Image (cartoon, rainbow, N blue to C red):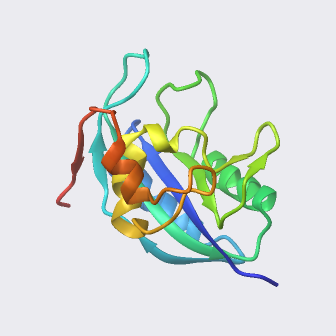
Amino acid sequence: MEHIVCHIGIGSNIGDALQNCRRAVEEICRIESVSLITRSSFYRTEPVGDIDQGYFVNAAAEITTTLKARELLNALETVERKMGRVRALKGGPRIIDLDILFYGQAVIDEGDLVIPHPELHKRRFVLEPLSEIASYAIHPVYGVSVRGLLDRLKDSKSVAKLNR
């Protein structure tokens, strides 16, 4: 089976958001056919959108997997449910949010599975942690590295590395 290098976005802003993100990384490591290569630091990030909510903790993980993209999505959604995620308000507060940012160089659009993540190039809270671990990764649609996307970014939302 082919091993695919993937990048996962991790975020939380309910309860102990930092601990939620740490636990999510542990749970990702427990998924069969998934191996953690590295993860970024954790960042305190200002929420985006029109919903009044608290700051998030965000991170990114680089994994390798033999799972197909749909299987990986299902496994990540299982982790979210196990951790208590309830999908109530789109863009609203969440105990954990796990997004497939890149699945190798694949471009997939199957309704509920869109890779690369359709908003990653617009969001500092995604690009800062992703650039820390994969600045060289090329966005398969735009042909620009993660570092290049971050350098061109117009998003001025606060993103600060946590020192714990």
Name which residue lies at 43% across and 16% down.
Answer: 51
Name which residue lies at 38% across and 55% down.
Answer: 148
Give x and y (percent) for residue 127.
Answer: 40, 50
Which of the image's four quarters has the N terminus?
Answer: bottom right
Which of the image's four quarters has the C terminus?
Answer: bottom left
Give x and y (percent) for residue 161.
Answer: 22, 54
Res 122 visible: yes
Q: Nearer the viewer, residue 97 or 144?
A: 144
Name which residue lies at 57% across and 50% down.
Answer: 142
Q: Is residue 47 left or right of residue 107?
A: left
Give x and y (percent) for residue 119.
Answer: 54, 38
**Quarter of the rendering containing residue 105:** bottom right
- Residue furthest left in the image: 163
Q: Is residue 154 left or right of residue 73?
A: left
Give x and y (percent) for residue 10.
Answer: 48, 52
Name which residue lies at 58% across and 42% down.
Answer: 84
**Quarter of the rendering containing residue 67:** bottom right
**Quarter of the rendering containing residue 135:** bottom left
